Image (spheres, rainbow, N blue to C red):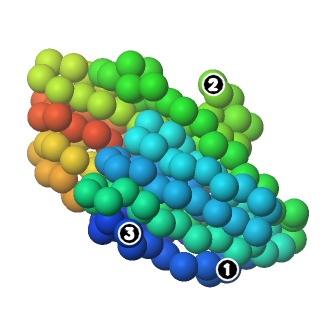
Amino acid sequence: MLTLRKSQDRVDPGMGFGKHGHRDMEIISYVLSGELAHQDSMGNTKGIPPGDVQRMSAGTGVMHSEFNHAKDQVTHFLQIWIEPNVTGIAPTYEQKTIPADQKRGKLRLVASPDGTQDSVTIHADAKLYSGLLDGAERAELALDPERKAYVHLVRGALEVNGRRIGAGDAVMLERENKITLTKGGDAEVLVFDLAA
């Protein structure tokens, strides 16, 4: 079974996470508001604004740090760790901008094993989708009933297959052939398609 772990953090102005290490882990950073400054031992020095998806494959080992350099804005972001299906590889980094209009009223693939649809590439049997839904907007995603789906609402309110959830809530779906997202109230949602 695939292991998935996530944290949702708010970083105050001038604060952050000092240099620390990871190995053999797929790490996805997804900024909701503010901006996160990233530095790593591969030489990457990037800002991660809302709308960007960053993937770091830690492989044989990487050191990195994350800070909010803003003087007056809190950075709100999600960091997702997925156990890779290959270990001992050289660490790599990738970052892509996913415009809001590509997520409006639909689920947009943002991470996948093969980088299809201009998603970041992860070394795991998993796909990650992001969507923005409000009012009458509706999004559907076909599922393989032999896999699992994990829906995490990062802000707003939403119905997932008829079940109402609020910001911070999550739903695990098993033996389902479809996810239907409706009745969004300024909703931003992440959907994971995972090996069972």
Q: Based on the displayed image, in which of its 4 quarters is residue 141 positioned?
A: top left
Nearest to the eye among marks 3 and 2: give it: 3
Q: Secondary structure at mark 2?
A: helix
Mark linked to residue 116: none
Residue wearing tag 2? 117
- Mark sitting earlier along the chain (2/1): 1
Using a 10 Å C-alpha cutoff, classify the residue at mark 1 as few (fewer than 14 neighbours), some (14 to 19) or many (20 or more). Answer: few
Q: Amino acid at mark 3?
A: Gly
In contact (CB < 8 Å): disc 2 and disc 1: no
Q: Position of residue 77 (x, y in %)?
A: 38, 57
For label 3, the crowd category at 10 Å Cα-Cα, with few meaning under 14, some 14 to 19 and many 20 or more, is few
For the point 47% across and 66% down, which residue is it? 67
Q: Amino acid at mark 1?
A: Gly
Rendered view: 28 above or below 137: below
The reply, left or right, for residue 196 in relation to residue 137 is: right
Residue that label 1 marks: 21
Residue at the image point whose x is 43% and y is 61% from the top: 69
Q: Is residue 175 visible?
A: no
x%, y% of residue 102? 44, 21
Q: Nearer the viewer, mark 3 or mark 1?
A: 3
Give the number of the mark in front: 2 or 1: 1
Asked if marks 3 and 1 touch (Cβ < 8 Å), the reply is no
Which residue is farthest front?
A: 71
Determine the image quadrant of residue 158. top left
Calculate the distance from the C-alpha at mark 3 to the C-alpha at mark 2.
Answer: 36 Å
Identify which amino acid the numbered label 2 is placed on.
Answer: Gln
Gap between marks 3 and 1 measured at Cα: 21 Å
Of the pair 19 and 139, the residue shown nearer to us: 19
Badge number at residue 14? 3
Q: Say what secondary structure mark 1 lies in.
A: strand
